[in-house]
Amino acid sequence: MVGGVEERLTVGRMAEPADVTVRTLHHYDEIGLVRPSARTAAGYRVYSVGDVERLREVLAYRRLGFGPCEIADLVDDPATDAVACLRRLRGLLLEQRDRAAAMVTAIDKELEARAMGIRTTPEEQLRVFGAQLHDAIGSAHPATRRTEPRIAARVWEALGDARTVLNVGAGTGSYEPPDRDVTAVEPSAVMRAQRPAGAAPCVAAAAESRPFEDRSFDAATAFSTVHHWRDPIAGLREMRRVARRVVVFTHDAGDAGWRLRFWLTRDYLPEVAGLVADRPPVDRTARVIGSRMEPVLVPWDCADGFLEAYWRRPDAYLDERVRRAVSVWTRVGPEAERRAVNELRDDLSSGRWAERNPDLVALDAAELGLRLLVA
Ligand SMILES: C[S@@+](CC[C@H](N)C(=O)[O-])C[C@H]1O[C@@H](n2cnc3c(N)ncnc32)[C@H](O)[C@@H]1O
């Protein structure tokens, strides 16, 4: 913590706790990455508290695999304060953890196939190492994920008279309006491959850097995807840049209220709080795109199997197919998943779940923090 750091440190005193060599610190000074703000009369480098914070940031990016030029761009970004920077780092670390989880899932699949005497192709073997979360879990998506017509109608209405629409993080295209000229953007090869025949053309790209001119679409939309983006703020700014109108369906990640209202995250999967902690609160998201915000209730018989869809149908979460189509279940890890499912199964058979949630059966729709942002 900054409060515990002495005002000024020499190279030797910086190197040891940071686990870097004095040579590295000299090198960082030479290339301008971490410059000591002062020198002693004898010419020795002296680092201030601010220099220490910068070094910590540089080292974290280095450990995440960024090169010196990328690190310089990140740490010199004038748009980020210390808190935004820590959030970004946290997001990148979670992404790395998710990628590792995706690789474990892909390797498990290959082991299973081998145990059954099925040999994977060289392409499949290589894919393990490029595995993104949705490349590992995406094949399970179509089993339960499809258009929820009542929510789709809200999104399509919000698009107004837009003729050309960019759908970012499009997945298999469940929320693409059939009567407009849609271009999809989707980084996962597995998701792209599952787009139905005749679906809108799809560009392989991520939200944060899209190969489109300013204002080249009437509208840009993103459905249930922003929480996956490495840098949601950069992605939303990109949407603003390329389109006149922006419509985003997302979660209020900053509001703990829905997690406490929703029995699944409250009583069985508290780990979800840690997964969303680095995500920008929805009002910040709304400010970035200058949007208004409307709550979207989840109907009790929601057709699209996203995390909250089965709030009145708890047995559904016992179904492996339901869980595999929602990334949260992979992201919390197998131990938390097993525990949550076992506890839920026990509570459903003992009647404890029904005792704890007596009011739900009378509700047709629930307010679980889902929001439509329209700018
Ligand atoms: C839960 S799925 C939703 C797909 C689709 N919008 C739908 O509602 O059916 C999330 C999608 O976001 C995509 N995604 C992940 N990271 C992304 C990024 N940085 N930019 C754009 N899309 C991303 C995933 O590959 C996945 O297809």
Image: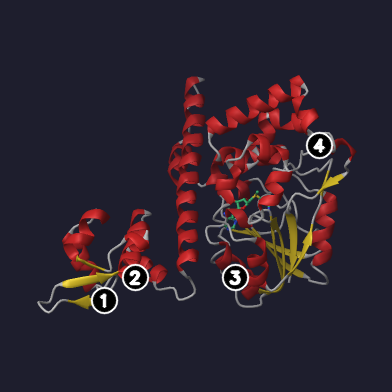
Q: Nearer the viewer, mark 4 or mark 1?
A: 1
**Mark in front: 3 vs 4:** 4
Q: Secondary structure at mark 2?
A: helix
Question: Considering the numbered disc 4 on the image, is that residue within a helix, a strand or a loop?
Answer: loop
Q: Amino acid at mark 3?
A: Glu
The percent position of residue 202, horizontal first and vertical second, equals 64, 58
Give 317 or 151, whichever is nearer the viewer.
Answer: 317
Residue plotted at (65% across, 45% down) = 194
Report which residue position mark 4 lands on. Answer: 312
For disc 4, the neighbor class at 10 Å (few under 14, some 14 to 19, many from 20) is many
The residue under label 2 is 50
Q: Gap in Å between the C-alphas at discs 3 and 2? A: 31 Å
Image height of 56 relative to 96, above or below: below
Lower sequence index among marks 1 and 3: 1
17 vs 341: above or below: below
Position of residue 296 in the picture relative to residue 232 (left or right)? right
Q: Residues within 10 Å of mark 2 (few under 14, many from 20)?
A: some
Residue marked by disc 1: 37
> Which of the two labelled residues, at mark 3 and mark 2, occupies the earlier sequence position?
2
Nearer-N-terminus badge (2/4): 2
User: Disc 2 or 1, which lies upstream in sequence?
Assistant: 1
Q: Residue at coordinates 50% horizontally, 55% vertically from top-left?
A: 91
Specify the label residue 238 is tagged with: 3
The x and y percentages for residue 306 are 71, 44
